[in-house]
Amino acid sequence: MTRVAVFSDSHGNIELLSKALATAKKHSIDKVYHLGDNYEDAQTLQKEKLEVLRVPGIFHPLYKTKQVPRKLRDHVEELDILLLHDENDLSDKEVAASDVILVGHTHRLEIRLDAHRAVVNPGQLKAPLNKGRPAAWAILEIEGRTCQIKILTPDDTVVAEATYNKPDVK
């Protein structure tokens, strides 16, 4: 089993990001994804000697200049995972090629499942409450073709969960 912590929209709140990371480490995570706003916030995560993949958010200069990729693809166990900040940047081809799509930007925690994929927005770590939305992050527990998805508060309360099973044929 591979466990991945997913953080988004920390907007420079290193204290809240660090609290969520401390909670994630209790779950024996193997790697971390950071979905932007702010790109540099992920440097805090890299100090932990964990594998970190990150993409910039739309308000970051690197997003506009395209000096770093806006999207990253990772293959974990038997799942193809796509990381990006803004779901509006998705192409139909990318959607079709992905089992799990991780997005940020809206600060709205969400898990959407259909017969072919899961779309997950872990929420925001900008503030304990931002635009009426509580701080949250996600953990993906991946084993083979199955992904258990949980969205948690920084103090480890599960607020949403679902299971995605990759179909035999897309």
Image: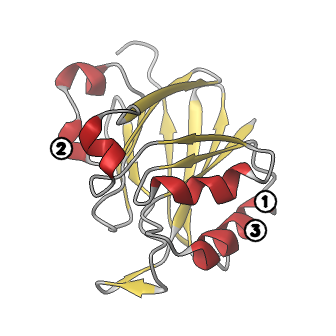
Image quadrant in which you'd find residue 26: bottom right
Q: Residue 44, position in %: x, y?
A: 67, 59
The circle on residue 88 is 2
> Is residue 98 rendered to the left or right of residue 42?
left
Q: Amino acid at mark 1?
A: Lys
Does dot 1 land on a helix, a strand or a loop?
A: helix
Quadrant placement of the N terminus: top right
Q: Amino acid at mark 2?
A: Asn
Give the spatial CA distance, label 1 vs label 3: 5 Å
Does dot 2 land on a helix, a strand or a loop?
A: helix
Above or below residue 17? Residue 66 is above
Mark 1, residue position? 25
Q: Residue 4, position in %: x, y?
A: 65, 45
> Is residue 130 rendered to the left or right of residue 154?
left
Identify which residue is drawn at 54% across, 64% down: 137
Q: Amino acid at mark 3?
A: Ala
Among numbered discs 2 and 1, the one appearing first in the sequence? 1
The circle on residue 22 is 3
Decide: marks 1, 3 in contact (CB < 8 A)? yes
How many other residues sit within 10 Å of disc 2, few (<14), some (14-19) or many (≥20)?
Answer: few
Q: Nearer the viewer, residue 17 or 144?
A: 17
Identify which residue is drawn at 39% across, 12% down: 169
The circle on residue 85 is none
Decide: marks 2, 1 in contact (CB < 8 A)? no
Identify which residue is drawn at 46% across, 82% down: 127
Give the spatial CA distance, label 2 vs label 1: 31 Å
Give the spatial CA distance, label 3 vs label 2: 31 Å
Among numbered discs 3 and 2, the one appearing first in the sequence? 3
Image quadrant in which you'd find residue 2: top right
Decide: marks 3, 2 in contact (CB < 8 A)? no
Does dot 3 land on a helix, a strand or a loop?
A: helix
Q: Residue 78, position in %: x, y?
A: 59, 20
